[in-house]
Amino acid sequence: MWRELTFKAMNETEGNIQVRLARTEDAGLISDYFLRNKTYLEPWEPKRENEFYTFEGWRRKLIKLNELHLMELGFYCLIFNTTTNTLLGTISFSNLNRFPQHSCSVGYSLDENMQGRGIMRTALRLACNWMFNVQNMHRITASYMPHNRKSEAVLEASGFQKEGFAKGYLLINGQWEDHNMTALINQSWQERA
């Protein structure tokens, strides 16, 4: 059951792009999205169990994600085209640390057929602004494999600054992959009571 959130739930829109928190009733949309993009996303993501591509697997996962939302420990967001009500991609915020870091990590994916249209740039900006303004994050980190030029371009256009390089950082598609490390800093961060 979806309980009332104690914070302003993410539901940000610009033009026909909407970014909102995932809900349990989104299980079918999400499983269809990942099944449709399985081959395309495989080189960029961890190996997935078969359950990851099923309605029931996502129904159970969304129950757990809802609890993370309620505890403000993580946020799993969906990107929609409001005109067609089509799921275009996902953005997730994890590793949330409050005092004294006020930081988190972001990851994202976009439908293969939606590449090159500026959708992720818009969605990432909306989502990061929400994390800064509502969740009061000071720092959002993102990493990408050096050969992932699309992700590099999205992060650069979104204001993320390269901070370093991590050898064998993440297990992606069964291989330990090197990653470039970036961060976006909330320049107007203020401590809240």
Image: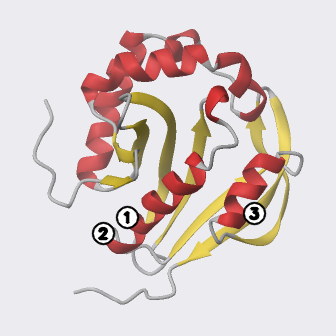
Which residue, given by chain and number where applicable, does mark 2 sit on? 134
Q: Residue furthest left?
A: 4
Label at residue 32: none
Which circle, 3 or 2, is nearer the viewer? Answer: 2
Q: Amino acid at mark 3?
A: Met
Frontmost residue, 36 versus 56: 36
What residue is shown with label 1? 130
Amino acid, disc 1: Trp
Alpha carbons under labels 3 and 2: distance apart: 24 Å
Q: Which tag is nearer the camera, tag 1 or tag 3?
A: 1
Which residue is rendered at x = 38% and y = 26% of the image?
A: 61
In the foreground, 71 or 2: 2
Tag 2 or tag 3, which sits nearer the N-term? 2
Q: Position of residue 53 (x, y in %)?
A: 52, 14
Q: CA distance from mark 1 to mark 3?
A: 22 Å
Residue underneath mark 3: 181
Q: Residue at x 60, y 30 (%)?
A: 111
Where residue 171 appears, as percent x and y from the top left, is: 75, 37
Quick check: 109 above or below 51? below
CB under 8 Å between discs 1 and 3: no
Amino acid of disc 2: Val
Could you tell me which quadrant the N terminus lies in? Answer: top left
x then y, percent, for residue 3 = 11, 41
SS for dot 2: loop
> Dot 2: within a 10 Å radius of its alpha carbon, few (fewer than 14), some, or many (20 or more) residues?
few
> Along the horizontal axis of the image, is 187 left or right of 62?
right
